[in-house]
Image (cartoon, grey):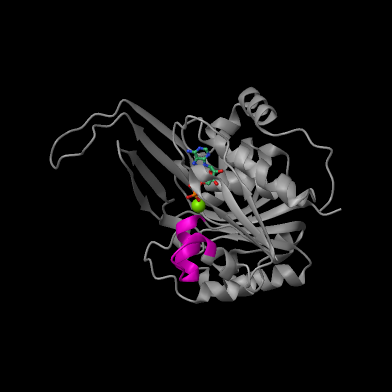
Amino acid sequence: MKRFDISVVGELNADLILYGLPATLEPEREHLAEDLAITLGSSSAIFAHNISLLGSRVGFTSCIGGDPLGKFCVDRLQESGVDVSGVKVLAAKTTGLTVILPLAAQRKILTYLGTTLDLQFAHLDLNYLGSASHFHLSSFFLLRGLRPRIPELFSKMKQSGLTTSLDTNDDPEDLWVEDVKSVLKSVDIFLPNEREACKLAGASDVQNALDSLSRLVPIVVIKCGPKGVLAKRGKNQFHAPSVSVQPVDTVGAGDSFNAGFLHKFILRCNLEECLEYGNAVAALSTTRAGGTEALRERNHRESFLQTSVSPRKGGIS
Ligand SMILES: Nc1ncnc2c1ncn2[C@@H]1O[C@H](COP(=O)(O)OP(=O)(O)O)[C@@H](O)[C@H]1O
Ligand SMILES: [Mg+2]
């Protein structure tokens, strides 16, 4: 038996979220927030944390600076059961931070990437990464130090017999350069959101994006916010509606979807079940601040998932 169910490579930083802000922020004024959450941030870390709490055995590889926020992030991952022996501490560097300002109409998101930029191929232990049945990487465009060798990394994971998944997340430069397509050759499951799928495929609507991407990847799942998800495996298309909730915020909803979906995929459940569970875990994540707090509350997590997932007999697709 492999040591882990899943190896995760990506960024690791905290989120600082200010709630109860005025509708607009005026220059030079001191505005007061009504509430503050300091919580685990970053797509890869939220994903790793949440899939671990769902019951997968997770090995996480990243790097942090030698500062208290870096330690806070590693502690949070460890509390969720993630193995953090692959997290390198770069003592002279500063861990990244995302500041999220949920205003009335839209969120403002500011990120200092910090050590996210410093993760290099040389930091990776390929034997450690290979001791899992599945490999996942998030935030392709933020991992600038690793990016040139991400295609090689995926190809090595496939050669070692792992199944693979990728969530690029957004490209802050909005360039969507072709190199990401060379990674897709070694990806089994691609998990973009609607905007990212259209940008990458150069498509004007989600159906065209799905059709085009599914010619490159065996399973494509496009996350469409409150509309749920669209997916395609070969010629078969699926739609799974979201679970109705009153969100506190949707930070990390996409990462939590990935956690639910891949937890079931690793258990070899059929695709419909993976999609439904992904939507349920994503909806759960929106019921508390940030991307991980709702899952950290064990009773809330278990009762929410029990009531929002239909009972099944199980089965292999
Ligand atoms: N308002 C909402 N109500 C219920 N579920 C939601 C809501 N917003 C997002 N979700 C769930 O989170 C998933 C991912 O959200 P989405 O915003 O599409 O991705 P990302 O966070 O990557 O941008 C959706 O597919 C859906 O399951
Ligand atoms: Mg996302």
Residue 163 can be seen, yes or no: yes
Spot occupied by residue 156 in the image (x, y as percentages of width and height) = 70, 72
Taking the image as shown, residue 272 lies to the left or right of residue 208, namely right
Q: Does the segment drawn in magenta span residue 199? A: yes
Relative height, residue 218 to residue 259 (above, below): below
Dividing the picture into quadrants, the one containing residue 46 is top right
Relative height, residue 37 to residue 205 (above, below): above
Taking the image as shown, residue 145 lies to the left or right of residue 86, namely left
The magenta stretch is 193-207
Secondary structure, magenta segment, majority class: helix
Spot occupied by residue 115 in the image (x, y as percentages of width and height) = 45, 57
Q: Nearer the viewer, residue 31 or 193?
A: 193
Q: Residue at x 58, y 50 (%)?
A: 229
Q: Residue at x 49, y 56 (%)?
A: 194
Q: Residue at x 42, y 51 (%)?
A: 96
Q: Nearer the viewer, residue 142 or 127?
A: 142
Taking the image as shown, residue 72 lies to the left or right of residue 237, namely left
Spot occupied by residue 116 in the image (x, y as percentages of width and height) = 47, 58
- Residue that lies at the very extreme toward the right in this rendered image: 1
Q: Does the segment drawn in magenta span residue 4? A: no
Q: Nearer the viewer, residue 302 or 61?
A: 302
Relative height, residue 144 to residue 305 (above, below): below
